[in-house]
Amino acid sequence: EHSDSAIASPLSAIADAFEELVEKVKDFKTGSCDHIRLDTFCEIASLVTVLFRCLGLAFKFAEMEYVSKLHGLVEASKTYQMLEDIIDHDVANDTVKTSGSYSRNLRRVRQGLDLIRAIFEQLLSTNDSSLKGVASTAYGEVCAPYHSWTVRAAVYAGMYTLPTRDQLFVKLNETEQTAEKKMRRYISASLPVIEYIDKLYLSRDIVLDW
Ligand code: 1PZ
């Protein structure tokens, strides 16, 4: 039911969806929060894939990677109801960090959401007409420490093919002015969700260095 508005303004749809989701986690610290349903999380995480399409062919690989991790979680949602259920499943089977496991896919999707947050923060704090610096800083902060040397080299090489800042906003059906508020809304709403996911691991003594 979100589809018309999602096409007109993908950024609005993304910000709206995260704000709705964050309602569930905002009382996490007081212990009175609802837990996040896996199917709901997958739906919301799939909204951000429109952003990849603005980046050009060089980032097709990033899109395919992200979508494949998300697909694993969609499959899991047929069996497991809540985010914590997949982590408990992998803890019990000693597969938390195993390639392709639910917990590992969740960790990767979470890194993708955090990367978008970092990109938006960079876009708000610079006026560079090129996206290369914005993207390199955000990627270096959020994802590079956890990616192999080969992947990092490919990503940095791809940075030269990114559209310009203006082209990005045009593709998103936005202007600098209309995008600014929506990016701020995503930053505020995604942070508690990201923190919530991290706590699911940390509370089970899983160190997040991978
Ligand atoms: C406007 C600014 C544009 C910035 C573009 C920055 C793009 C960064 C692209 C990152 C590509 C990552 C490619 C491959 C990563 C894989 O090594 C890992 C492996 O996981 P494993 O199988 O070992 O568990 N895969 C991932 O981390 C999943 C996908 C991450 C992609 C997130 C991209 C989000 C980009 C948002 C763009 C707006």
Image: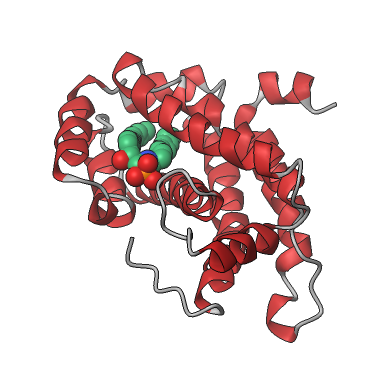
Q: Is residue 113 above or below residue 176?
A: below
Q: Which residue is painted at 50% across and 38% down in the image?
A: 69
Q: Is residue 63 left or right of residue 32?
A: left
Quadrant housing the N terminus? top right
Q: Quadrant of residue 130?
A: top left
Q: Position of residue 180 (x, y in %)?
A: 52, 42
Q: Which residue is painted at 50% across and 76% down in the image?
A: 202
Q: Is residue 117 left or right of residue 8?
A: left
Residue positioned most to the right? 1
Query: Is 111 or 201 nearer to us in this picture?
Result: 201
Q: Is residue 35 above or below residue 67?
A: below
Q: Is residue 139 left or right of residue 67?
A: left
Rendering quadrant holding ligand 1: top left
Q: Position of residue 177 (x, y in %)?
A: 53, 36
Q: Quadrant of residue 168?
A: top left
Q: Which residue is painted at 46% across and 19% down in the image?
A: 53
